[in-house]
Image (cartoon, coloured by chain):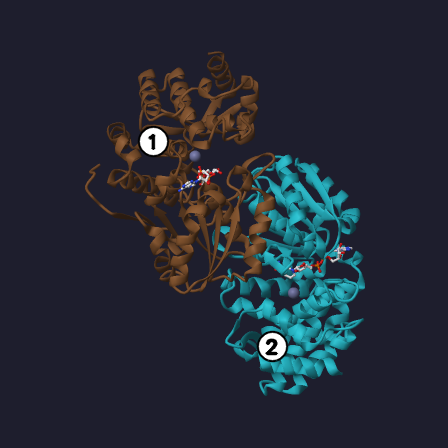
Chain colours: A brown, B cyan
Amino acid sequence: MSSQQTSEHLVHVPLGERAYDILIGDGLIGRAGGEISTRIKGRKAAIITDENVGALYHGPLMDSLEADGFDTVSLTLPAGEKTKSFDHLTKVCDVLLEARIERNDVVIALGGGVIGDLTGFAAGIVRRGVRFVQIPTSLLSQVDSSVGGKTGINARQGKNLVGVFNQPDLVLADTAVLNTLSEREFRAGYAEVAKYGLIDKPEFFDWLERNWREVFSGGPARTEAIALSCQAKADVVVADERENGRRALLNLGHTFGHALEAATHYDSSRLVHGEGVSIGMVLAHEFSARLNLASPDDAKRVERHLKEVGLPTRISDIKGDMPPAEELMKAIAQDKKVKGGQLTFILTHGVGQSFVADDVPSSEVLSFLSEKLER
Amino acid sequence: MSSQQTSEHLVHVPLGERAYDILIGDGLIGRAGGEISTRIKGRKAAIITDENVGALYHGPLMDSLEADGFDTVSLTLPAGEKTKSFDHLTKVCDVLLEARIERNDVVIALGGGVIGDLTGFAAGIVRRGVRFVQIPTSLLSQVDSSVGGKTGINARQGKNLVGVFNQPDLVLADTAVLNTLSEREFRAGYAEVAKYGLIDKPEFFDWLERNWREVFSGGPARTEAIALSCQAKADVVVADERENGRRALLNLGHTFGHALEAATHYDSSRLVHGEGVSIGMVLAHEFSARLNLASPDDAKRVERHLKEVGLPTRISDIKGDMPPAEELMKAIAQDKKVKGGQLTFILTHGVGQSFVADDVPSSEVLSFLSEKLER
Ligand SMILES: NC(=O)c1ccc[n+]([C@@H]2O[C@H](COP(=O)([O-])OP(=O)(O)OC[C@H]3O[C@@H](n4cnc5c(N)ncnc54)[C@H](O)[C@@H]3O)[C@@H](O)[C@H]2O)c1
Ligand SMILES: NC(=O)c1ccc[n+]([C@@H]2O[C@H](COP(=O)([O-])OP(=O)(O)OC[C@H]3O[C@@H](n4cnc5c(N)ncnc54)[C@H](O)[C@@H]3O)[C@@H](O)[C@H]2O)c1
Ligand SMILES: [Zn+2]
Ligand SMILES: [Zn+2]
């Protein structure tokens, strides 16, 4: 992977009549009006954002849209995972209908994955679908949630249980906005970046081990890592848009991660998604080693890198009490389909060599987790 | 159209990987378990119904499903249009998630269009889509709402404004259940049957003029009229699944009809959907005559037939006060896109010769409606 000076990247997602572009670069929000107006017929734009992001970037986005002749309407929601609810979905739909957003008009998600998931869902169901643009502002949303078309909300039974597949018409990943993201949120997003290396790109993981400081400090290495991540996710999505096979690899670290998120009641002061994924990826490598599928050295190498960038890597890194292993297993069983005591899991033969295993005995997972919790 | 004795009809809807069958015949509910189990992998079935239909047919359906090895869970909702709401959608999703309905399990809508639209929407968004079977029990739902994949709920801004396209995996139209449908609801559904003739099948309209009594009394003529209606709708849907062109013809009579429904606040004691469509179709023919597109005799012929079967055909047939023409225009403008004072409308050159007109001056509609309201 070279790190030559490139100001802007374009990743095209070739999904037939649902094909779209992801633009990655500095200052895209200031150019949003122009980029959107060449791709969308309507002249009404609804901006959905959260309080944190809105305070910083709503003004510039609105200015750019209005300069390009859009009528805008805006809705600012509370920040945080709880916003991905039926109540807020109803609210967003109401605002879009009240503003008379029609099929060719555009709904813009300006924010992290929470705003992107909620807004994409609303845009997919209002009038059975209106135009939709993602302006992801967190690292996690730039490299993960804004690509792939999964949108949705949470239910009391679990996360992301209600939603639609809704590919955006355009993604504008403005890397400049990452400078206001908290260090902790940036790190959490970085876990997903590293994930792409761990899934099937060992050379990218090598590169990250050498260049992560530049990725954190900004500049071309950061833009390049984001572009490569978007490309990696887009490749998987194009191969498997509706998640029947290979797309499951994107869940590396996520089965354990989701269980930890559930165990901490999605309390972001204790654990955010990317942190759960970080611990989950280390656990997935350790569990693979325990099943003699991979070398324990790989697990150590993964842990070393994630720790170096400042991510939590062990369950004991989470503040506060953790429930017993049985409780974690319950969350895993709710997340995954258990068939005759067997679980589907993403395991690995080593760095960059992950695979889908659909015959993991849940008893093995339970005893592994019990051990981990004892430490 | 022949009326030979045929006990069962099958209409195949060839939509590629979303293709499905519509079975039309007597006693299909008793065979539902078998028909569904050959088409669906999962072994959990959720039945969503309303109070009226549930009291009559929930038991037989559940028995049939359980006899074929399905685990069932059921939810009975209040009957009526108000059930198509965000609150009930949330409730249905909650029940499906609580029952752990997975992607290959099935959600069954047992009821009229209200239950079908709501349930189809929920089935389309829970886990981003689970299997879905329609068992339409009203004539309207058998010939119209269960075919075509439009699902959704109402918003305070208007009807059907939030939803998804979600083709069912199977439609079972059991004609025996129509015997418990009220005469009034049967007639309302008949308006949609007549609509297919008026759109582009003049010979079907002729046939209905001659055979409507048999359609009302049951037997092979009824089954045949339903099958032909399903086929007519399926043809349009296949040509234009996502409603960009020809599918608009299905809205014959509906622009006026929806305005009348809105004007009566969806109060079914005053007007049900099919009654609004009946009046709306007469108005569409009269309006076409007024624009010198069709002969006034066609309007009279249409009115004569609809009146003969007992449907309302004039605005003055609606009990209670009607708002002024300006109010009806507002509802029309909310329903349709108004571009530079021009409306898109379904007009006609005569019986069975309707077409999409996208340049109808709203001033003409207004003066036409004012006249109609004066009488
Ligand atoms: N759809 C998908 O495929 C997919 C994939 C992964 C994750 N997700 C979802 O994404 C969500 C997590 O996304 P997230 O981590 O972006 O969470 P988030 O949207 O809550 O953003 C994290 C925090 O950072 C703030 N923030 C975002 N951008 C900022 C900026 N530029 N400057 C300052 N503050 C900023 C937000 O206000 C929020 O407080 C979860 O709900 C998860 O389920 C979805
Ligand atoms: N999705 C579409 O393409 C589409 C098309 C047309 C209409 N619709 C929708 O369909 C709805 C109207 O459908 P509907 O007319 O079936 O209304 P409905 O579902 O309210 O049914 C009408 C009444 O008949 C009762 N009923 C139904 N079947 C019965 C039976 N066999 N025996 C006794 N009672 C029975 C119901 O309980 C209800 O009280 C509207 O919401 C409309 O928007 C949707
Ligand atoms: Zn993730
Ligand atoms: Zn209708």
- The percent position of residue B261, horizontal first and vertical second, equals 70, 67
* A21 with respect to B228 (left or right): left
- The percent position of residue B61, horizontal first and vertical second, equals 72, 44
Quarter of the image that includes the N terminus of chain A: top left
Please tell me how many numbered marks the rendered image carries. Answer: 2
Residue holding disc 2: B352
Per the rendering, the mark at residue A194 is 1
- The percent position of residue B268, horizontal first and vertical second, equals 76, 62
Task: Return the chain for callout 1.
Answer: A
* B253 with respect to B185 (left or right): left
Task: Return the chain for callout 2.
Answer: B
Q: Tell me the residue at 49%/44% (across/down).
A: A51
Q: Tell me the residue at 47%/49% (across/down).
A: A166
Which amino acid type corresponds to the residue marked 2 in the rendered image? Gly
Mark toward the viewer: 2 or 1: 1
Please state the quadrant of the image where ligand 3 appears. top left
Which amino acid type corresponds to the residue marked 1 in the rendered image? Ala
* B84 with respect to A202 (left or right): right
Q: Is mark 1 on a helix, strand or loop?
A: helix
The crowding category of the residue bearing disc 2, from other C-alpha atoms within 10 Å (few below 14, some 14 to 19, many at least 20), is many
Distance from mark 1 CB to nearest ligand 3 atom below 8 Å = no
Q: Tell me the residue at 35%/22% (across/down).
A: A307
